[in-house]
Image (cartoon, rainbow, N blue to C red):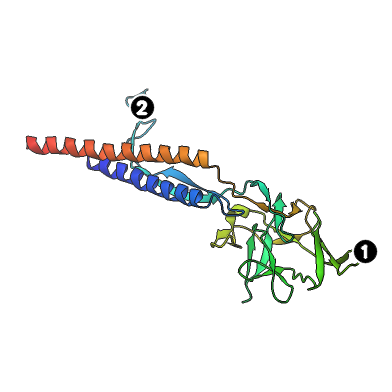
Amino acid sequence: MIRAMRTAASGMLAQQMQVDTIANNIANVNTSSFKKNRVNFRSLLYSTLREPGASTSANLMNPTGLQIGSGTEVSSSIKLFMQGDLEQTGAPLDMGIQGDGFFRINLGNGEFRYTRDGGFRRDGNGQVVTVDGFLLMPPLTVPPDATEIVVGQDGIVQVRVGGADTLQTVGQVRLTRFPNPSGLRAEGQNFFRETASSGPPSEQIPGQTGAGFLRQGFLERSNVAVVDELIALIQAQRNYEVNSRTIQVSDEMLQQVSNLI
């Protein structure tokens, strides 16, 4: 009975972490470019009371053995970088990534972060920055007298200055790709950090060598499907209840044994 309690308790803890993950996904359903998390489970150690294949007599063997598990645990969590829907905003410096890749952001302290949130703005110097003022890399400056901004699918940025008949090119937005995006470390503020598991960053031109295209005036929505999360939430709740019921039954059985002594 004690074993059953510990096993069920491990299941309750695992389901609690599942609910925590689902809650974070649902909370960020309206966060631009948010990528949902999924937790993975694995079984804990088994107690082998009878080895499978052990001899039972001279010419016979045990076909299945006897093993008792000790529960479950959360083995890992993974970011699912599935494409989110692109929502039209009309803002000239909003850029949605259709496909693979990240924007490279300079934090100003010698460190860089990566994001798919393309909600950019101009600062007082005309530089293109995030909503928190961090620079987009490579640096891009829009002239203060620009009356029109055009961002091509290949990242080429052109502006119309004053009443000029032609557009002039002021730079190009590039995307960064990783061999294993799921290995990136999420740090909040829609930022990811490079790790040994993600592999080294590779800067590429949008639309080339596997990088996605840019869509001006669009933002990528979260890839969280609320219906799927609610179904998963109900399943986690039911699993939690069943595990708690297992503890209750084990406790009742233990009380009956104690009354016999």
Of label 1 and label 2, which has the lower sequence position? Answer: 2
Q: Secondary structure at mark 2?
A: loop
Reply above or below: 116 against 7. below
Amino acid type at circle 2 is Asn
Of badges 1 and 2, nearer the viewer stands 1
Q: Quadrant of residue 189?
A: bottom right
Circle 1 is placed at which residue position? Answer: 165
Q: Residue at x 93, y 64 (%)?
A: 165
Asked whether residue 48 is in view, the answer is no
Q: Is residue 9 left or right of residue 215?
A: left
Amino acid type at circle 1 is Asp
Residue 37 position, x and y percent, is 52, 49
Circle 2 is placed at which residue position? Answer: 62
Q: Is residue 63 left or right of residue 127?
A: left
Residue 149 position, x and y percent, is 80, 62
Reply above or below: 241 against 60. below
- Count of labels in the image: 2
Asked whether residue 87 is in view, the answer is yes
Q: Residue at x 12, y 35 (%)?
A: 256
- Dot 1, crowdedness within 10 Å: few (<14), some or many (≥20)? few
Q: Secondary structure at mark 1?
A: loop
